[in-house]
Structure formats: C-alpha cells, structure tokens
C-alpha cells in the first residue's frame, strides 16, 4: 500500500457513516434528480424569457442585476423548500416509532447523526448552487453587478438554507406526533419565510446598490451582521437541542444545551459591554438584556418539560462535594434544576444589566431604565408563573388515567398562555358587545387583562400587571417548593452499583 | 411487560414464544435498545440497556421482523454503512463484509437494491446486518416469517452454526414445530408475563412429564386403541391413520412396560416409537391464547 492510498483509506475510515450513506442514497434518488431537472429548467426558462423580452439588454446596465435578483430568488426558494424537506422527512421517517431505522441501534452518536445530515444537506445545496453557477456567470456577463455582491448574496442564501435545514432536523427529532410536527413546521415556516424575505431583501439591496454602495452604510452592515449572527446562534441552539433529543433518556441531555446557552449568553454579554464602552454609538445593554430575559422567560416552558428523576448513569457522575454538586445540579437534566437554572440566568442578566448599565454605572434610575427593568422582570415572572402552573396542573390532573407525559408540559404552558391572553378579552366582547357597556377602551385595562403578560408594555397598566405577576409567581413558587426541595435533595451520588431491578432481562 | 425476568446463556439458542400481543417484540426491541422500558432494566453481559445503551449496542445484533424499506441503496452499501456505523475500519471492515456475504449467501446480490430482493433474501441481508459487528448476543424477531421451506432450512442451519460459534441467540417465531428442532431452551410469555423459562429438558420434564408413543400393529388400529384405553398407565390415546398415539404416564420404564403388556396380550407390534413432546405441545399446554 503506498502512502497515497494509506491516506485515502484513513480519510475513508474517518468519514461520517451517515454522510456516506446519505450521499449514496441521494445519488440514486429519483426525487433528487427530478428536483435538479426542474430547477435547471426553471432557471433556463426564466433567463430565456428575460432575454427574449428585453431587446435593449446590450445597451442597459441593469440586466445583470435583474437576472441575479431573479436567480437568487429561485435559488433561495428552491433550496429552502427542497433541502430542508428532503433532510427532515428522511430523518423523521428513520425516527418513526413504527419503523425505526436500525441505524439508531448502532454506535453512531447523536451528534454524528445530526452533523451527517447537515453535511449531506450542504452537499445537496452545493450541487444546487453549482447548477446555478453557469446562470450566475451569465448574469455577471450581462453587467450591472459585481462579484463581491454575488458572493455575499450566495453566502446569505446559504445561511438561510442552513437555518431551515437545522430547523427541519430538529422537528424530525422531537418525539411527537406527525400532526404536532406539521403544526410546529407551519409555525417554523412562518418564521423562516420572514427570515428568507429578510435575506432576499438584503440580497436585492446589495444587488441594486452594492454592499459598499449608498445602502452599504453601518446600519446596513449592522442589520446584516445581526441577521447572520442570529441565524448562526439559532442553528447552534437547534443543533444542541437535536443532539439532546436523540441522546438516550438516561443521559444528562440538557448539559450541552445549557452549556451552549450560557456560553452564548456570556459572549454576547461581553460584546455588549465592549460595545457600550468602546463603540461609537453609545448604545446600552438593553438589546442583550431584553433578548436574554425574553429567551429565558420562554425557556421556563422547556424547563418544566424535563423529567424529574435521574438514573444510575447521571448519578454516577454527581460530585461528592456540596459546592460542586450544587453547580452540577444546575447543569443536570431535571425539572427543578431547569427551573432554578433559568431563574438564575434571569436574575444574573438583570443584575449585570443593573450594575453595568444601570444606576451603579451612573445612569439615571427612573424613566426608560425603570420601565425596561420592570417590563423585563414582569415578563420573567409571567413566564415562571405560566410554566409552573402547567407543571402543577400536569402533576395534579394529568398524571393518572388521563396521562400527559412530562415532555408535553410546554404544550400545557403554551395553551394556558394562549387562553390567558385571548380568553378574558374574548369573553368580555361576547358578553358585553351591544349592551352599551362595552367600548374599545374597556379592553385596554381592567382585571380581565391581568393574565395577559403583553399588557406589561402598556404604561397604563404596568404596575397592576407586575403586582399580579409577582403574586401569581410567588404562589406557584410556594406550591412547588416541597417537591423541588425533594428533587434537589435526591440529587446525590450513587452509593453503590445497583443490581438489576424487577423486570430485568439478563444475559449471562 | 409486567415484571418479566429471564436469562439465556452463550452458545445456546433460546426460543421466545407467545401469542400475538404477548410482548415479544417489545421485549426484543428493549434488548436491542430500540425502545426504552418505562421501568426496569435489561443487562447484556452485565451492561444495562437503559443506563449504557451505547455500550450495549456493541454486544447485541438485532434482526427485526421487517427490514426498513430502502429504495435507493444496494446490499453491499447497506452492509458497508452498518459496518462503518459500528466503527469497523479497513481492512477489518472489508474482511468482515466479505465474510458476511459469503456466510449469508449474498455474494451474488451485492449490487442489487434492497427493495428488489425477495423476502428470503431480505431476511438474509437483515441477518448479515445483525452480525456485522460480530456481537456475542443475537436477538432475532420472527426471522423465518414469510420464508419458503428451503430458506427456512438454510436459516436453521445458519443459526446452529452461530450458536456453535458461542453466540447467545434469542429467537421468536410462530412456527413452533421448526423452532423445536433448534432451540436448547424456551421462554414462553403471555400477556406480558413469563409463563415458563429455562432449558427445554427441564421445562418438559416439569410440565409434560409423561411420554408420547406411536404404535402400529398388523391388526386394525381400533382394536389397539380400545386396548390401550383400558391400560392403567395410559392417559390418552388417539388414532392417527394406521397408527395410535398414546400418552403414557411415567418415564422410559413405563414405555417398556407398555410394550411388554401389548406383546403379552398378543398384539403383533410392528412399530413402537417414543416421540419427544415439543415446543408446540408445551406452548398449547401452558398458554390460553389471551392477548393484552
């Protein structure tokens, strides 16, 4: 064996098996071939029609820009529709409970599965991009657009596709019914469409004026960077979440998820501080604090959906020293741990914000700062209250014959939020409309709005909502303390290896 | 499943039998780490499938009752994927795949797509897939379902070879007469509970202690049948063509005494065969056919 074949063999051995399998299957797939043919035909027809109906193309300088815009739309639309659907449906089919693919009983790690699927999606996207390359070259030759603009547009499109693929893979991983996946998929598609149109708009802006042209000022680049960073961070979050879902239930699934969130929160916090003190704009830390609090307020619903017991696998790794154990508890899967970690992150965010960008740092305590602080704290309290109410309801009402698994607690929380936000107002309208006791002003305040956390943004009823949210959260905390303390107390290292319990099947 | 507990040793084939819906596939999927039990555990060579499924996967080869439908992958690519998925590196991977293709008789099919294969060939691919990482334990769920007679015989021979290689094999099947010919032990399950588990000889001597003898004389079988029913050691007797089958209480001494008595009575015995009670009789005797 010569050195070259030895290297080739080593590379071959190091390849992710999922990538090898998926690539082989994609090459043979009639569906993939059909999509490519349709994509090529569509581009050909569109470019041909454009040339046909623009006889002055040779004398105009906008031809390349227009054709690039059209091709970019086709490319982004095709990739965002085809690649995520292809990747997501395949994984969902392989994960189907009735016909689970046997690759999940092999030693391929959950991370390798997701990475393999992502790489394969990248290969498919690369193929589509390469099929578009001759048309883009043609557009460039028509003049009116430069190469950096084309490459930036393509990079932006690639980021959008990566986000859509990772979202599709996440949906495929979650253990829920097809109906729920379709519902979540539609919701996600709405968000992704917004993202896609933002990307398209930026692409068009770049193709019209160039990234370094009149629109290419700091605002444009800040928006572009924000969009790209948000996409990258969301891809990362969905990746760690997907890996967690695929990991064995006995593993500490939430450790990488929480570690990732803390890392991102910390890095963005440091960037915010640097931005505040070194940046020319003098912007404060509100964006970081607001995004963090809103994120963690929603995260309460995720935390209450975690299981409440640990197996030997987790308990074997619990530290003996109390301080280390307390830190480990916050990074271990579990309802109480998740809720405490989330609450801790909110408190830390608000404390850092208060210290670095608040009165301590010389800022006037009243006015905007106070409003921002109250709204943030209020949202966190409502998030906690809704999530804990859902957890308590599930324990009290849905743990017997009418059983709802713990991992669906977030659905109860979201249902409660929907009811609390819409129901009181709807009842008010239905009962009072036409009776002379109702006007639009009736909806703007009053006790029926108290369960709606979005009224915190209204100056008129902020205090009432803050008080209500505080009382409700305190009641839920009081009701939860006994079992949360029990759960925390049970977080102890394994004393000795347990033997097989009843129901064991032993091979000897 | 309801508090089931059993073990099966290396180098033996154990039949896992029960009515439809008894929980066989669920148990096997738990052993293969395809499903997680709501409570309890299963150990493969001391490795928990709940706590360490990743380790347990190295030890188990699972052949489900279906092969996931792959339209766009050939036999060799399919096996190559699983070899890679279990971390086999070249040249070991190539050797393992070549050996498996030869063992399962797949060498001529390696470039065919999985979808184009017959049921029997798919089962061979599935068995090869389960063996790709040379696991010490094999879990086979209905491996003979849908196979033609020749394929069944070949599968039986393959399983015997694997048991001789020291693998612990747990195999479920509804074709109990065929399973009887290869199993060393049995686990009988009904409504999620173990009805009997152990080596065949132990179970049979406990649950079917009597002997079954098949007798033919040159006289009409009705005469023999009548005479047998009047003998004290005979529990039941039935005419089966020219033969009479009699269930005898006791061991081989009782069979000898029965033959002596027939000869004493002047029956011209031309055939006297003792037949071992099999898994099918045991199963029918122990289960009620109830599902969960």
Image (cartoon, coloured by chain):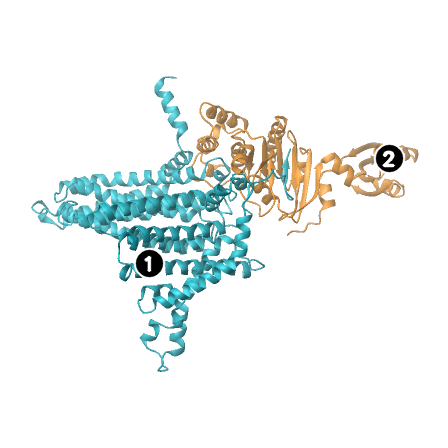
Q: Select label 2 or label 1 by which is in front.
A: 1
- In the rendered image of the structure, the colour used to display chain A is cyan
Residue under pointer 2: B254
- In the rendered image of the structure, the colour used to display chain B is orange
Q: Does residue A415 lie above or below B174 as drawn?
A: below
| Image coords of residue B24 (percent x, y) | 62, 44
Say whether mark 1 and mark 2 are on the same chain.
no
| Image coords of residue A2 (percent x, y) | 36, 17
- At mark 2, the secondary structure is helix
Name the residue rendered at 26%, 53% in the picture.
A362
| Image coords of residue A458 (percent x, y) | 31, 66
Q: Which mark, by number, is residue A373? A: 1
Q: Is residue B153 left or right of residue A405?
A: right
Q: Which mark, by number, is residue B70? A: none
Q: Is residue A86 visible?
A: no
Chain letter for the residue marked with disc 1 in the picture: A
Q: Nearer the viewer, residue A59 or A20?
A: A20
């Amino acid at each position: 064996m010569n050195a070259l074949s030895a290297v080739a063999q080593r590379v071959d051995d190091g390849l992710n098996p999922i990538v090898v399998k998926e690539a082989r299957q994609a090459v043979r797939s009639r569906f993939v071939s059909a999509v490519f043919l349709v994509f090529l035909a569509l581009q050909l027809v569109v470019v041909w029609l454009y040339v046909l109906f623009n006889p002055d193309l040779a004398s105009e300088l906008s031809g390349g820009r227009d054709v690039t815009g059209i091709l970019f739309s086709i490319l982004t639309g095709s990739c965002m529709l085809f690649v995520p659907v292809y990747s997501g449906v395949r994984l969902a089919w392989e994960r189907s409970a009735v016909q689970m693919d046997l690759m999940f009983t092999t030693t391929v790690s959950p991370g390798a599965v997701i990475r393999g699927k992502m790489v394969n999606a990248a290969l498919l996207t690369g193929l589509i991009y390469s099929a578009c390359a001759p048309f883009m070259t043609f557009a460039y030759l028509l003049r009116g657009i430069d190469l950096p603009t084309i490459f930036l547009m393509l990079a932006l499109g690639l980021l959008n596709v990566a986000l859509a693929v990772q979202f599709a893979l996440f949906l495929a991983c979650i253990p829920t019914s097809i109906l729920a996946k379709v519902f979540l998929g539609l919701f996600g598609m709405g968000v992704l469409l917004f993202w896609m149109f933002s990307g398209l708009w930026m692409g068009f802006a770049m193709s019209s004026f160039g990234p370094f042209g009149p629109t290419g000022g700091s605002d444009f680049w800040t928006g572009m960077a924000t969009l790209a960073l948000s996409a990258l961070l969301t891809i990362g979050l969905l990746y760690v979440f997907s890996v967690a879902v695929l990991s064995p239930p006995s593993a500490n699934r939430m450790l990488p998820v929480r570690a990732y969130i803390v890392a991102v929160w910390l890095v963005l916090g440091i960037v915010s501080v640097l931005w505040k003190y070194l940046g020319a704009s003098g912007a404060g830390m509100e964006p970081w604090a607001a995004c963090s609090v809103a994120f963690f307020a929603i995260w309460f619903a995720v935390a209450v959906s975690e299981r409440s017991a640990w197996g030997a696998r987790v308990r074997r790794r619990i530290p003996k020293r109390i301080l280390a154990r307390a830190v480990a508890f916050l990074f271990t899967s579990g309802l109480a741990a998740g809720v405490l970690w989330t609450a801790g992150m909110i408190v830390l965010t608000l404390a850092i914000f208060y210290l670095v960008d608040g009165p301590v740092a010389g800022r006037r305590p009243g006015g905007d700062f106070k409003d921002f602080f109250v709204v943030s704290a209020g949202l966190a309290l409502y998030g906690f209250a809704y999530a804990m109410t859902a957890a308590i309801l599930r324990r009290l009402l849905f743990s017997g014959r009418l059983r709802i698994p713990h991992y669906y607690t977030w659905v109860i929380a979201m249902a409660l939020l929907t009811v609390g936000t819409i129901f009181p107002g709807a009842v008010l309208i239905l009962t009072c409309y036409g009776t002379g006791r109702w006007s639009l002003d009736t909806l703007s305040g009053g006790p029926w709005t108290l369960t709606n956390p979005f009224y915190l943004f209204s100056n008129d009823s902020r205090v009432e909502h803050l008080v209500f949210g505080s009382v409700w959260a305190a009641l839920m905390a009081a009701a939860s303390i006994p079992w949360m303390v029990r759960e925390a107390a049970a977080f102890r290292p394994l004393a000795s290896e347990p033997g097989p319990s009843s129901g064991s099947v032993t091979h000897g | 499943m309801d508090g089931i507990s059993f073990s099966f040793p290396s180098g033996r084939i154990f039949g896992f039998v029960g009515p439809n819906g008894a929980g066989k596939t669920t148990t096997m999927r738990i052993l293969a780490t395809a499903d997680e039990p709501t409570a309890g555990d299963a150990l493969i060579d001391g490795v928990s499938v709940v706590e360490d499924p990743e380790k347990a996967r190295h030890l188990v080869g699972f052949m489900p009752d279906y092969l996931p439908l792959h339209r766009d992958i050939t036999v060799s690519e399919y096996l190559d994927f699983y070899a890679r998925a279990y971390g086999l590196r070249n040249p070991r991977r190539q050797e393992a795949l070549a050996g498996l293709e030869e063992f399962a008789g797949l060498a001529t099919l390696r470039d065919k797509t999985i979808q184009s294969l017959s049921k029997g060939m798919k089962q061979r691919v599935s068995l090869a897939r389960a063996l790709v990482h040379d696991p010490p334990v094999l879990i086979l769920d209905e491996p003979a379902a849908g196979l033609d007679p020749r394929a069944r015989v070949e599968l039986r021979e393959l399983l015997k070879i694997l048991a001789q290689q020291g693998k612990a094999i747990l195999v479920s099947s509804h074709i109990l007469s065929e399973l009887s010919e290869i199993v060393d032990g049995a686990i009988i399950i009904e409504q999620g509970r173990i009805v009997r588990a152990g080596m065949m000889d132990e179970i049979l001597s406990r649950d079917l202690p009597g002997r079954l003898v098949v007798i033919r004389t040159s006289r009409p079988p009705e005469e023999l049948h009548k005479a047998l029913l009047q003998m004290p050691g005979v529990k039941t007797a039935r005419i089966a063509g020219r033969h009479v089958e009699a269930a005898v209480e006791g061991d081989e001494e009782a069979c000898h005494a029965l033959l002596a008595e027939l000869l004493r009575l002047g029956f011209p015995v031309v055939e006297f065969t003792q037949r071992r009670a099999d898994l099918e009789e045991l199963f029918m005797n122990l289960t009620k056919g109830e599902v969960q």
